[in-house]
Image: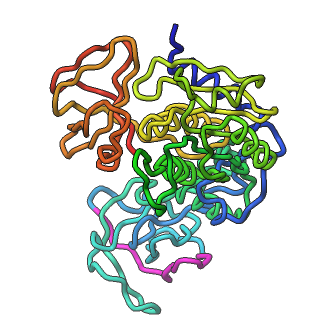
Amino acid sequence: MHRTVATHREAVRQLLAPLGNGGRTERLALLDALGRGLAQGITAPLSLPPFSNSQMDGFAIRSADVPESGAELRVVAPVPAGAIPAALEPGTAAPIMTGAMMPSGADAVVPIERAVPDSFPVPGGQAMVRLPPAAAGTFVRNAGSDVAAGQPALAAGTFLGPGQLGLLAALGICEVNVYRPPAVLLVTTGDEVVEPGQPLPAGKIYDSNGTLLEAAMRQAGVCVIRAGISTDSPEQLRAVLRHHSTAADLIVTTGGVSKGAYEVVRQAMDGQDVEFLHVAMQPGGPQGIGTFDGVPFLGFPGNPVSCLVSFEMFLRPVLAGLFGAPAPRPVVRARLAASLVSPEGKHQVRRGTLLPGGLVRLEGGDSSHLVHALASSNALVHVPEGVSELAEGSEVEVWML
């Protein structure tokens, strides 16, 4: 019996849940917190805007002074941004700049282009201006209309991007408590695997998994510990893991988790609290999960696309839920540019390119070794378990990469 994608993702979440418990936080300056998850909710210490201000360059007025036919008002001292204006007397209009504080008594702003004349008079004169009516609140940003003092500003677990950091700066906050990213020990395995840049003997392949997964993890804000390539010796793999795992919050291996004769990760985990199973997913069905010497462990398949899909389906969303980072993948609905077939009992994940107009084009076939097709893609296309074929034009869920 194969485990469902949702069941395995929940198992990964439970495995890593202790990492989200208190104590794994640090206080950082705002820009250093970019891309992190907020560890504590933020309550607004002040209102935004902190005072009612003008949304336009124009004239601040008392709306009751201007009937439907318009009115001619005496122009008083202008109100520049940053100034504290005098109260607005009845029958007068104050030239006001965008963002400037509304005078006491004023409740509306008429844009300069609607005034006659449509320009500000020279200060100090006895100018008059004819203005059309404006309802109370017109072109006025009321104090607290964005967020009021004492209201929640950002919830714990919020991903801190430019917009969130800008809000915190507007609230006068310069430091925040964020989650420390987990440290992941990443080990690729296989006698057939060679480091890029080295000579490539016959029967060998270059290791793409290490670069692929480390890049995905670093993009997700994870601290990656690379231990190089381990051979198909269980003893050597155990030694590598024990040498590096004391500094790791999580161990991730690639390869050696299927049911073949030389599955080194399975052999190295003998006696450990690790389960090897099959998830109803293509690619990325074979998975390992448990602990090695008490350190959380995930074993991903060895084919490049399989290991990346495993990361995207299981580890990345769990990290986002626990630490508020990385940000979840944007999810859109798109229509297939061509028909497809899928194993009925599996959740299939295909590489694709989202095109203008809401079409998604599949890249390459469903084989898990097609790295070039992966590099040509900007999305993952999901075909749910139980769906065996979809016609051209069918709507599918797409995760943007």
Vertically, is 235 above or below 86? above
User: Which residue is more in the foreground, 384 or 145?
Assistant: 384
Residue 64 seen in render: no
Which residue is most to the right? Answer: 23
Residue at 34 percent of width and 23 percent of height: 383
Vertically, is 108 above or below 153? below
Query: Percent position (x, y) of residue 149?
Result: 69, 51
Which residue is most to the top? Answer: 1
Vertically, is 336 above or below 354? above
Residue 274 seen in render: yes
Tag count: 0
Residue at 41 percent of width and 60 percent of height: 139
Magenta stretch: helix, strand or loop mostly: loop
Query: Percent position (x, y) of residue 346?
Result: 40, 17
Residue at 27 percent of width and 69 percent of height: 114
User: Which residue is more in the foreground, 265 or 81?
Assistant: 265
Let me know if residue 361 is in the magenta part. no
Let me know if residue 71 is in the magenta part. yes
Q: Which residues are magenta?
A: 70-85
Tell whether 282 sits left or right of 255: left
